[in-house]
Image (spheres, grey):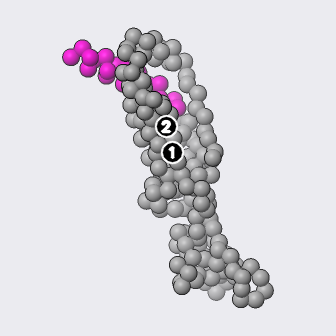
C-alpha cells in the first residue's frame, strides 16, 4: 500500500504545551477530533481530485475510497482505497468502427480492435490471440495509485499545513467548554 507521510510545522511546540496542561485522555480525544475534522475535508478534496484526474464519476470514487478515522488510541487518519484496476466499462465506452472509444484519465481515445461484450457485463475486451479466443479484459486507472499522485497528492499536502491550526482551534474549544 502506498503512503503519504506528512510532517508537522513549527506550531507543534505550542500545541504540546497546551496539551500538557490537559487531562491525557481528553488531550488525545481533542487531537483525534481535530485530525478527523481536517481529515474529512481532505477526503472530499482527494476524492474530487481523483475523480477529475481519472475521469471516474465522483460517486464511484466515494464508494472505492473510504476514510479511516482517528481515535484517542490511534491518532491517525487514512483513506483506504481498493487495489483493483478499474474496468473500461466505467469510462463511457462507445463502439466505433475501429474499436471501442472510452475516456480513462479524462481523455477519450480509441482502443483499436476492442469490443464491448454485453453478455459479459458490458465490459470492454480485446482478442489476445489470432482466433476468436482467448480474450482479455481492458482496464483503466488504479484509484489508489491515482490518489497519491498529481492533484490528489497536493490536496494531502494542503491539509498538512492546516492540521496544526485545527488542533489549536480544537484545544481552544475544549478549554472554553471546560470553563463554561
Q: Give the residue drawn at x 54%, y 39%.
A: 156
Vertically, is 46 above or below 118?
A: above
Q: Is residue 169 magenta?
A: yes
- Indicate left or right for 61 with 145 as reference: left
**In the image, is residue 158 above or below residue 44?**
above
Q: Which label sits on residue 58?
A: none
Q: Which residues are magenta?
A: 160-180
Q: CA distance from mark 2 to mark 1?
A: 7 Å
105 above or below 92? above
Residue 64 lies, in percent from the top left, at: 50, 56
Using a 10 Å C-alpha cutoff, classify the residue at mark 1 as few (fewer than 14 neighbours), some (14 to 19) or many (20 or more): some
- Whether residue 125 is visible here, answered yes or no, is yes
- Foreground residue among 132 and 13: 132
Q: Residue furthest bottom?
A: 131
Q: Nearer the viewer, residue 2 or 104?
A: 2
Q: Quadrant of the image for the C terminus?
A: top left
Foreground of the two, 87 or 112: 87
Main SS category, magenta section: helix
Residue drawn at x 58%, y 70% as measured from the top left:
88
Picture residue at 58% right of the left edge, 64% below the top: 86
Tag 1 residue? 79
Q: Position of residue 9 (x, y in %)?
A: 55, 22
Residue drawn 78% across the image and 86% down it? 130
Q: Is residue 125 left or right of residue 89?
A: right
Q: Which residue is mark 2?
A: 77
Question: In the rendered image, which quarter is residue 25 located in?
Answer: top left
Disc 2 to disc 1: CB gap under 8 Å = yes
Name above or below for residue 41 compared with residue 130: above
Outermost residue toward the right in this view = 130
Residue at the outermost left position: 180
Amino acid at each position: 500500500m502506498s503512503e503519504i507521510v506528512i510532517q508537522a510545522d513549527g506550531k507543534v511546540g505550542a500545541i504540546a504545551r497546551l496539551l500538557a496542561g490537559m487531562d491525557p485522555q481528553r488531550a488525545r480525544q481533542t487531537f483525534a477530533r481535530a485530525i478527523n475534522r481536517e481529515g474529512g475535508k481532505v477526503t472530499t478534496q482527494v476524492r474530487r481530485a481523483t475523480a477529475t484526474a481519472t475521469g471516474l464519476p465522483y460517486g464511484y470514487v466515494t464508494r472505492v475510497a473510504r476514510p479511516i478515522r482517528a481515535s484517542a488510541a490511534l491518532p491517525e487518519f487514512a483513506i483506504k482505497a481498493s487495489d483493483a484496476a478499474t474496468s473500461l466499462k466505467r469510462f463511457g465506452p462507445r463502439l466505433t468502427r475501429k474499436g471501442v472509444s472510452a475516456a480513462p484519465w479524462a481523455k477519450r481515445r480509441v482502443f483499436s480492435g476492442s469490443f464491448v461484450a454485453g453478455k459479459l457485463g458490458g465490459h470492454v475486451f480485446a482478442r489476445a490471440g489470432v482466433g476468436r479466443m482467448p480474450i482479455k479484459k481492458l482496464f483503466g486507472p488504479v484509484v489508489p495509485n491515482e490518489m497519491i499522485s498529481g492533484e490528489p497528492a497536493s490536496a494531502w499536502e494542503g491539509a498538512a499545513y492546516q492540521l496544526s491550526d485545527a488542533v489549536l482551534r480544537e484545544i481552544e474549544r475544549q478549554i472554553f467548554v471546560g470553563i463554561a
